[in-house]
């Protein structure tokens, strides 16, 4: 099956710094990428959806200025947590999809996740 | 609105017992997809099954089986003869093409934590 990688797999940073997480589709072109956040013992919550070359669509309650998403190519999307604070500590999971607007099905493949700890 | 409800927060069974994880969904889409994922302690999601809304056939894969009933909007997952390695969090998810956003969204249920004791 299709492979999605995330880098780094874990990161610890000081409060106030920015952290960038990369999501790559290794053997396919992803027209759509999704970013999820998962707090301990909770479900995955969709943060935003991004299509290659266009601005990300953020879910209600997600600050677009704090969580910057760039989907510059069909194989790479990045999530930057700006001025991270302890409450941003979470497990961030990306997924890459193969459909775009008007398609009948979006096959999604999930990355392994990035565990962010903000001290 | 789309919603996935997994009413069982935690289930604890003894090895070799059968266990069923419940999933109830809500959607206004006529075409949608249902999934089950396993999340072991490592955190990486493991895909188990995908079902589209037009295929109500039940499916069996080894010790795993799934019962999809549109009439009750349910997509339940049964593990037969459970094993310790089945201990994980299991998520039911719903994916649909939401015309107002112009794209797909996948919504996850809250998850059911399964403990299988030896």
Image (cartoon, coloured by chain):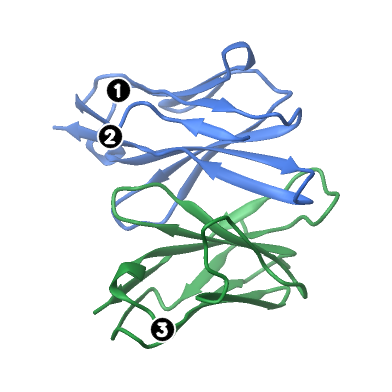
Read off the residue under disc 1: B81
Across and down, in percent, residue A49 comes to: 64, 61
What is the C-alpha distance between the residues marked 3 and 2? 36 Å
What is the C-alpha distance between the residues marked 1 and 2? 13 Å
Same chain for the residues under marks 3 and 2 in the image: no
Which tint is chain A? Answer: green
Viewer can see residue A112: no
Label 1: element kind: loop
- The image's mark for residue A83 is 3
Residue at the spot 66% in from the left edge and 18% down from the top edge: B56
Q: Is residue B19 left or right of residue A65?
A: left
- The image's mark for residue B114 is 2
Numbered disc in front, either 3 or 2: 3
Q: Is residue A42 left or right of residue A78?
A: left
Looking at the image, residue A95 lies above or below residue B114: below
Which tint is chain B? Answer: blue
Residue A31, quarter of the rendered image: bottom right
């Amino acid at each position: 099956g299709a492979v999605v990688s995330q880098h780094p797999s874990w990161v610890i940073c000081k409060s106030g710094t920015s952290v960038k997480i990369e999501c790559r589709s290794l053997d396919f072109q992803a027209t759509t990428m999704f970013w999820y956040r998962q707090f301990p013992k909770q479900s995955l919550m969709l943060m935003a959806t991004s299509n290659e070359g266009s601005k990300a669509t953020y879910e209600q309650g997600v600050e677009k200025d704090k969580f910057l998403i760039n989907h510059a190519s069909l194989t790479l999307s990045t999530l930057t947590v700006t001025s991270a604070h302890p409450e941003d500590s979470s497990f961030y999971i990306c997924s890459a999809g193969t459909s775009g607007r008007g398609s009948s099905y979006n096959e999604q493949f999930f990355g392994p996740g990035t565990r962010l700890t903000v001290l | 609105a789309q919603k996935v409800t997994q009413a069982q927060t935690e289930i604890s069974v003894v090895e070799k017992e059968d266990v069923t994880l419940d999933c109830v969904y809500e959607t206004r889409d006529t075409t949608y997809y249902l999934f089950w994922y396993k999340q072991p302690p490592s955190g990486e999601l493991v895909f188990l099954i995908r079902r589209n809304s037009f295929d109500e056939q039940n499916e069996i894969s080894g010790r795993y089986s799934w019962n999809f009933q549109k009439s009750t909007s349910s997509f339940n997952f049964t593990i037969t003869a459970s094993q310790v390695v089945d201990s994980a969090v299991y998520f039911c998810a719903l994916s649909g093409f939401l015309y107002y956003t112009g794209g797909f969204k996948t919504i996850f249920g809250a998850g059911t934590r399964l403990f299988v004791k030896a």
